[in-house]
């Protein structure tokens, strides 16, 4: 098994960006421009590496390789975005990798692009990229190309060497368990379990009882062998069940109006472990949006817009308005799920206005994370 933290270090140590890896400060998949740039790099790296993995490292400063981290990004449907726009799409995997010097809510994102022999190209346009565009890597740049794409096999030995030097060891695994249990989460009743005598999962959270059911909040779950964060949320709650062969996380989203909050099942994620040293992750969406009184939602939507206008004009908010502002991300989300189609974009546009309010900005990021899961409408991005 490859230790993903070590792999990232070895990639960053291998000179600068190259024809087999790219690095980004952060991903922006909320806009057509951000999606287009991401897809361009996926296309180019895939075409330039037909026989070896290629990588994108997210959360790194471009000029000096400083590991600064990015938000936990759990959109497993990122493959759907690639499939929607690229012909002959490569298989990709996004993993969240914790680093000791980063805050608990920050990770380094690792995008792995699997090798394939067929040429990838855009089957439809997005932003400034037109249909049928083909991209390859030239040094650290993803550039368009016309005509035949010459197959490049020169990276194979280098990438395999980097991956082999990033293999896990008993020491890395033990260090990871000790760090998780004794340092990062010692005040949250951390637990661990060993699956198939090979895989170690550590998890920690704060028990929270609601209507005779016990949930965990402020949850952190890691697959220690590969240094992958499987789940992280500062606000949402989960339940955990496991046996000798599998570990299941069911995520719930708190939704409600007028301080009446209920927990709705959002997604179930099950990690299956096998005797041959492999594992797979299955995900199942469970969410059914609750329906609220439309007249009340119109009132809340307009009140939210009035709050944002006051923030834009730098007008001081009353104590009651500050309380309403705390609920703005979740109430905009409820409006969107009940047919207010522009509520999601209004929330995204409010990012800079909400950023000075620490806890509210955290709620903003959580709301967008949930909306990505529930309403990641890739066809919308193609229009």
Image (tube, rainbow, N blue to C red):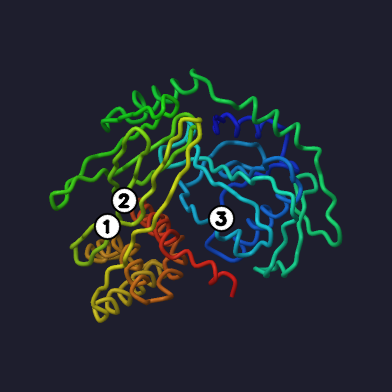
Instruction: Label 1: state its secondary structure.
Output: strand
- Please name the residue that numbered disc 1 is placed on: 254
Q: CA distance from mark 2 to mark 3?
A: 24 Å
Task: Say which residue appears at 64% left-offset and 25% top-offset.
Answer: 165
Mark 3 Cα shell of 10 Å, populated few (<14), some (14-19), many (≥20): some
Q: Percent position (x, y) of residue 189?
A: 26, 30
Who comes first in sequence, dot 2 or dot 3?
A: 3
- Disc 3 vs disc 1: Cβ atoms closer than 8 Å? no
Who comes first in sequence, dot 3 or dot 1?
A: 3
- Please name the residue that numbered disc 3 is placed on: 79
Q: Percent position (x, y) of residue 304?
A: 33, 71
Task: Say which residue appears at 29% left-offset and 56% top-offset.
Answer: 265
Q: CA distance from mark 2 to mark 1?
A: 7 Å
- Please name the residue that numbered disc 2 is placed on: 236
Quadrant of the frame with the N terminus: top right
Instruction: Label 2: state its secondary structure.
Output: strand
């Amino acid at each position: 098994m490859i230790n993903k933290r070590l792999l990232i270090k070895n990639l960053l140590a291998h000179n600068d960006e190259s024809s087999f890896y790219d690095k980004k400060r952060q991903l922006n998949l909320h806009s057509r421009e951000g999606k287009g740039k991401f897809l361009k790099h996926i296309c180019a790296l895939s075409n330039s590496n037909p026989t070896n993995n290629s990588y994108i490292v997210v959360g790194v400063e471009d000029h000096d390789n400083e590991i600064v981290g990015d938000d936990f990004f759990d959109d497993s449907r990122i493959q759907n975005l690639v499939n929607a726009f690229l012909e002959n799409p490569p298989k990709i995997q996004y993993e969240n990798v914790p680093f000791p010097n980063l805050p608990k809510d920050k990770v380094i994102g690792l995008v792995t692009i699997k090798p394939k022999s067929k040429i990838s190209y855009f089957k439809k346009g997005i932003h400034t990229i037109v249909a049928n565009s083909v991209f390859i890597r030239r040094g650290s740049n993803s550039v368009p190309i016309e005509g035949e794409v010459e197959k490049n096999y020169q990276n194979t030995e280098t990438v395999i060497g980097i991956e082999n030097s990033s293999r896990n060891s008993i020491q890395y695994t033990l260090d990871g368990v000790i760090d998780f249990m004794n340092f990062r989460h010692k005040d949250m009743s951390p637990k661990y379990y060993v699956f198939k005598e090979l895989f170690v999962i550590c998890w920690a959270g704060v028990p929270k009882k609601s209507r005779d059911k016990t949930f965990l909040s402020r949850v952190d779950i890691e697959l220690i062998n590969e240094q992958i964060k499987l789940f992280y949320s500062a606000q949402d709650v989960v339940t955990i069940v496991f046996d000798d062969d599998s570990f299941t996380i069911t995520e719930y989203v708190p939704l409600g109006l007028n301080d009446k909050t209920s927990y709705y099942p959002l997604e179930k994620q099950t990690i299956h472990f096998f005797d041959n040293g492999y594992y797979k992750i299955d995900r199942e969406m469970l969410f059914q949006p609750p329906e609220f009184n439309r007249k009340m939602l119109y009132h809340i939507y307009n009140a939210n817009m009035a709050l944002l206008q006051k923030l834009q004009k730098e007008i001081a908010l009353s104590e009651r308005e500050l309380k309403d502002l705390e609920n703005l991300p979740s109430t905009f989300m409820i409006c969107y799920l009940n047919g207010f189609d522009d509520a999601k974009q209004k929330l995204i546009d409010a990012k800079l206005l909400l950023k000075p309010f620490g806890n509210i900005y955290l709620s903003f990021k959580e709301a967008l994370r949930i909306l990505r899961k529930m309403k990641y409408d890739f066809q919308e991005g193609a229009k």
